[in-house]
């Protein structure tokens, strides 16, 4: 067991070091106009694809519908995650904090597994910072959550009036993502927000939880 433990530990450290070197080399490639690091952009695209595939499985009535649902989900999921990332980058530059968009392989597996079990409920990425205790970071997470909650509720309300599948996809995906994110367990955003300001976290969490139940279980 000691041999296996030492071997796997060394392998994990070796893999992490190789990933770090690869990421550093990748970030030397600058892309015009796009404000994100190249490694973070690739992570974001990977997360969008994973969520789009899993959400397409949920939305498609038959296998023939999956491709069309995938295209629609690329648009809706891509829009929401891009808004979130642009806000993160803007806030980080304004308040001079270093935040990172990280791809989460285990979370991706949970996302895929939960989808096939009947309900997508996981995250494939995480946002981290050098010092998560500093006030700007949880405040950024809180404000980002408020913005996305408003978008989700607006799309849900608009869908009740005009009815469109894109509006449904945006509202359902966004509220699902926020419901997971606001869970007060690290590394979820809710843990940092709750530690920063418990009353604000509680009010926002209740709003999101009620919205999640209504949107996903047809309570209206």
Image (cartoon, rainbow, N blue to C red):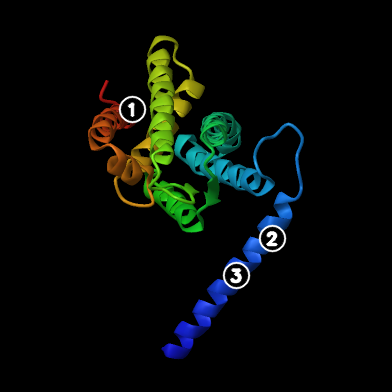
Nearest the camera: 101 or 67?
101
Up the image or down, 200 lies above or below 17; here it is above
Q: Comparing marks 1 and 2, which lies closer to the viewer?
A: 2
Mark closer to the chain start, 1 or 3 = 3
- Give residue 143's mark: none
Nearest the camera: 76 or 219?
76
Which quarter of the image is occupied by the N terminus? bottom left
Per the image, label 1 sits on a secondary structure element best described as helix
Give the labeled residue for mark 2: 22
Q: Residue at x 37, y 45 (%)?
A: 118
Give the labeled residue for mark 3: 15
Which quarter of the image is occupied by the C terminus? top left
Residue 180 screen position, x and y as percent: 36, 42
Up the image or down, 102 lies above or below 193; here it is below
Up the image or down, 119 lies above or below 95; here it is below
Give the labeled residue for mark 1: 215
Asked if the residues shown at circle 3 and circle 2 are in contact, with their CB atoms under 8 angstroms apart, the answer is no
Residue 10 screen position, x and y as percent: 54, 79
Q: Residue at x 30, y 27 (%)?
A: 211
Nearest the camera: 149 or 27?
27
Q: CA distance from mark 3 to mark 2?
A: 10 Å
């Amino acid at each position: 067991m000691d041999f296996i433990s030492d071997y796997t530990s060394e392998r994990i450290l070796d893999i992490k070091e190789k990933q770090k070197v690869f990421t550093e080399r990748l970030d030397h490639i600058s892309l015009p106009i796009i404000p994100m690091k190249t490694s973070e952009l690739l992570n974001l695209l990977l997360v969008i694809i994973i969520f789009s595939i899993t959400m397409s499985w949920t939305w498609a009535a038959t296998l023939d519908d999956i491709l069309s649902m995938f295209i629609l989900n690329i648009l809706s999921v891509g829009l929401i995650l891009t808004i979130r990332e642009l806000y993160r980058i803007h806030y980080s530059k304004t308040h001079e904090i270093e935040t990172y968009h990280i791809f989460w392989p285990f979370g991706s597996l949970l996302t895929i597994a939960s989808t096939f079990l009947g309900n997508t409920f996981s995250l494939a990425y995480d946002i981290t910072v050098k010092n998560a205790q500093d006030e700007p970071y949880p405040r950024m997470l809180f404000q980002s959550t408020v913005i996305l909650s408003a978008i989700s509720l607006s799309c849900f309300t608009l869908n009740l009036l005009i009815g469109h599948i894109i509006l449904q996809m945006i509202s359902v995906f966004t509220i699902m993502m926020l419901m997971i994110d606001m869970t007060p367990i690290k590394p979820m955003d809710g843990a940092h927000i709750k530690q920063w300001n418990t009353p604000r976290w509680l009010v926002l969490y209740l709003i999101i939880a009620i919205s999640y139940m209504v949107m996903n279980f047809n309570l209206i």
